[in-house]
Structures are given as structure tokens and as C-alpha cells.
Image (cartoon, rainbow, N blue to C red):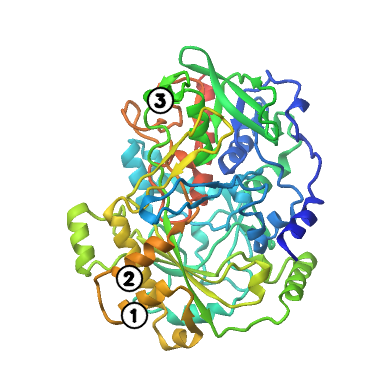
Amino acid sequence: MKLNNLLRFTSLFISVCSGRLYHDPSEILHLDAYDYVVVGGGVAGCVLANRLTEDNNISVLLLEAGPSHQGVFAIEVPGLQSFTGAGTIYNWNYTSVLQANLMNQRLPAPRGHVLGGSSSINGMWYTRGSSADYDRWANTTGDIGWSWDQMQAYFKKSERFVTPADNHNISGQYNPALHGEQGPLDVSLPGYNQSLDQLVTRRLDESFPFIEDYQNGEPLGFGWTQTTIGSGARSSAASAYLDQYLNRSNLDIVVNTRVTRVLASSGIHVDTVEFIRDTETAGVRMRVQPKIDILLAAGVFNTPQILLNSGIGDASFLSMLNIEVMHDLPSVGKNLTEQPAIANLWTTNGTVVADPVTAFNKAVAQWNNSKTGRLVMATGNNVGWIRMNMSDPAVNALVEQYGDPAPGPKSPHIELLPSISAFGAVQNFANAEFVLDSVVLTPQSRGTVTLNSSNPFGPPMIDYRFYTEPQDIEIMRQGVRTALDFVSTPSWQEFLTAPVSPLLAAVIDEYNSDSRDNTAMDAYIYASTSVSFHPVGSCAMSPEGSDWGVVNPDFIVKGLNGLRIVDASVMPFVPAGHCQAAVYAVAERAADIIKKQALVR
């Protein structure tokens, strides 16, 4: 089944309206009746909408630019993740500006353009990172509430650890004490046994140890993946936090509605949200004024875009674009942090399916019938978290000069992700290419999100600025070498036939010769680096009263009243892992803070 055909097929299942979920802003007639307006229906926005309306006396309007997630087959089925990616209506389809350090390539900048945000289209990985990640947040912001120990309650509050789709015995594959049991978000271990699993587990030894559960705060070693999947289906922020609660009389949700600006009626009090139908860029602007606060949860790219279009940002930059300055806040759009990633790819002697379309259709039928089989997973079943080789002279010299890029000695620098190509795509039923991703978990380089014009509908200018700090290129060198170490055993060499990229072949030759001049390595890195889809930090938290940062530790935008930001953009540093779990926990804490401060009022 071709991509376009599948999307036409799945579009038949998009519901028109459910409960208090509206598909047009004109359907909302009481635009002055809300205590809070949440801008953006991604992970944080869905959590806020749910938790705030647990109090019947609090009313919330949630505005989402994209369509509803409901009934979209490619969103619900984990293995069809690739069908909600680039070029679809469920993705903002952003790209970066030309990357000077990457041979002037443009890199993808995908984000979810659908209710549930990126949790509706992502790889569903659930990883918290290391304890030192959050202790660094606490030290950076001056708020002990961001420490690892304090944040555990919020991770568990969001989570419901469930049995995997194949109901296999999971004893020894995770630590129950680390997980929540009553939260709305399903999290599970792999529900489909892949042929790759035995190769990976046989490789584990002192250099690549097994870790029972990488949510323990010291994630070093290889463990079984944990993903936001329950009963064989994706568990997104929308399905977990909204679907069961759509009949709450104090919650209205409007999709297909894009926020253009926030406005201040007087001075520093921001009290108005301006929005428009997402499909009508030249249409009539509508406005809503919440009684208490505007909660910006539009994501790491769109939140700074909305702020800048509102006149909140670097005053000199805004003046150049003839945008009236509401509030000079130079850090807006700065500190963008993304984890560089390389997909190291080999052909293999694995089984080739003669009729991939038939095999794909059988997998879809199996999922429809029992929610089991190949399509209950979107990726590989194992993941490795690794520190750099501190005995390497190059690493030692780098650490001596700049310090350890990781926040603590039990924090990894590198992630290795083994899988068989892109797991759910139709074409991959016809081959058996092996991917071993190398990811820089602790990048020091910082990018920006800016505007290219005063047009609120123009895509933001996203500049990752990869490898502008020397630590990052050395971590990636270590990441590629570690990948080659991992597949150096006879069983792996028997499975792998050849590297797909000639540049990787040259790296392997360099590796086998014990050369460390990095000529082939760096050529490969600069040509092959992409993103890991974990951008954070463009509106970072900092201590109250600090002259840098965008929000205080309680999410209030510095120097303004009535406006908070709650999404991945507030993270001052990216956790050493995938950031989805962290966003859930951040939003859970934000909801508690907002409710407590409302009581004080």
C-alpha cells in the first residue's frame, strides 16, 4: 500500500466532532468565559488541559493548530509512524536554515501538527534521562523542585506501566518500583520479539553491560526499550489525557485553529490571544481573553515564533522587522538544543521478503484483528547508553580543557539504537538493512529560532548550529567508534555484509588501521549528521531576577503578567535521552504550580 493511498484510507476515520472537541473556532460562542487559554495541544498542552479542569471551578480553552488525532489509523498503529511524518498534514514540515558545519545541508525539523502534538507522530520512546540532568536543572534555576528526587512524583503521576502486547514474561526487564501504575499514559516494554534481539543481547558484556531499567537515574548500559504503547496501540498525550475527558463541561478544545499573537491591553499585562482558522492565512483574526492566564504550549519552534510576532523578544531584532516591541526579552529563541544523530547503516544477510506488499497487508490485518505482531513496535527493542572512553587521549584533553559535557559521572554521552531499518514502512518488508544510530546526548552547541518576516504564518528560521562547540564533534567521533566496537564480534560480522555509505566504509578502514587522524571520520560525520527529533530550550528557564532566560522556574514569562510557557522550550538543558517523558513531567509539575498559585489569588 503506497503512502498516499494509506493516508486517503486513514482520512476516512477522522471523526467530525466528539464531546466538546470542535473543528472550527466559530463553533465556540463563549469566548470570554475561560479562566485559562492553553495555546497548543501537544504533550504539555494536553496535560495542562486535563489537570487544570480536574477542578470543576476552573475552565479551560485549548487551541490546537492541527487536526484531531481521533480515528487516524496511522497515528494509532505504532508501526505506521513513518506515515505521519514529512509531507503529511500531521507534521509542521519545518526545515532548518542551511547548516554551515554540515556541508550547507538543510536538516529536518519535524513537530506534530495534530492534537497530541509530537506524541501523536513520534517514535514513542519513554526515557527520563539521568538524575544529574534534573539536579543540574535545579542548580541552574535555583529551584530544588526541579531536582531528580522531586521530579520522580511527576514522572510516576503521568505513567501507567502496562503489560506488552505479546503478554510475555517481563520479569528482569524492568524495575516496577521505578514506575507509576495509575497515570493516564500507557508505557510498556517491547511487544514483539525481533530477530535482532538475540544478536544484541549476546553482545552484552563488561564493555556493554545490561541494565535492568534505565529509568533508575544512572542509565549506563543496554536495556529493553520502554515506549508509550498500550494494548498494541500508541498512547499519546491526546489519547491519554483528553479522550476520556471530552465531556467535561469546563473544557473546550478547538482544533484547526492557529494562534498568531498574544496581546497586552495595558503595560506588561498580557491578556489576549489572537487566533485564526489554520487553513485561512488571510482570514479574520479572532480573540479571546482568559480571566487568569495564557499558557503557551506551542512547542520549541512555535512558542518563540508566537512571542516574537507578539513583540516579545530582542528589541533590536524586532525593530528590524518593524514589529512593535511589547517587551524586550533577548533570550527568546536562543539556547535551542538538539541532539545530533547519525544512522550508521549496513546491508545484511537477513531474510528478504519476496512480496512486501502482501506481508505488509498481513501485518495490518493482524494488528486490526488482535493488536499484535510486527506493527505494535515502531523501532528496535534495545537501546544503549554509554559514556565516552575517558582513557582516550583526545577525550581526556577535551575534558581537561572544557570539563565533562555530561552533568555527572553516571550520565551517558552517547546513545546507540540498533534496529532493522525504519520498522513499519512498507518498503522495509523487502529488505533487512541494519541501522545502529549514534546520538550525541549532551551537546554543548546552541542554536536559535527566529523569524524571517513579520508574517505569523511564515515558517520560523531554525538554526541548529551543530558542531559549533568542539566537544560535540568528539562525542560523535566516539559515538561512531562505539558503534563499530559494538558490531565487531564474529556473530555481528557474519550478519552484516557491507556498509551502505562509502563514507562509512572509509571510516571502518580508518578504524581497523587504528588511525586517529579523523579525516575519514569527520568527512562522514559532516555529511551524515541529522537530528534526533529532541529539540528543547528555546525559551529557557532561569532563576527569578536573572538577566538571561525567558521564564522563571514557575513558568511565568520574565517581566510580564498573565503569560506562562509550559513546553519543551523551557528546558535549560536537554536530558540525556529522548525528551518526551520529561515534557510530561514538566507539564504535570506546571499544573500543580498553576493550581496552587490560583488558590493564593
Q: Which mark is residue 558?
A: 3
Position in image of residue 231 (x %, y %)? 69, 61
Which of the two discs, 1 and 2, labels the residue nearer the N terminus? Answer: 1
Residue 322 visible in rendering = yes
In this image, 218 relative to 196: left or right?
Answer: left
Residue ID at (42%, 41%): 537
Amino acid tagged 3? Lys
Alpha carbon separation for disc pair 1 and 2: 9 Å
Q: Which residue is at the far top?
A: 266
User: Tag 3: Cα neighbours inside 10 Å, few (<14), some, or many (≥20)?
Assistant: many
189 is higher (above) or lower (below) than 102: below
Image-quadrant location for residue 281: top right
Judged from the image, the secondary structure of the residue bearing numbered disc 1 is helix
Closer-to-camera residue (265/48): 265
Amino acid tagged 2? Ala
Q: Which residue is mark 1?
A: 509
- Asked whether the beta carbons under mark 1 and mark 2 sit within 8 Å of each other, the answer is yes
- Asked whether the beta carbons under mark 3 and mark 2 sit within 8 Å of each other, the answer is no
In this image, 228 relative to 308: left or right?
Answer: right
User: Tag 2: Cα neighbours inside 10 Å, few (<14), some, or many (≥20)?
Assistant: some
* Quarter of the image with the N terminus in it: bottom right
Residue 166 visible in rendering = no
Alpha carbon separation for disc pair 1 and 3: 53 Å
Q: Which residue is mark 2?
A: 520
In this image, 204 relative to 424: left or right?
Answer: left
For marks 3 and 2, give the one nearer the viewer.
2
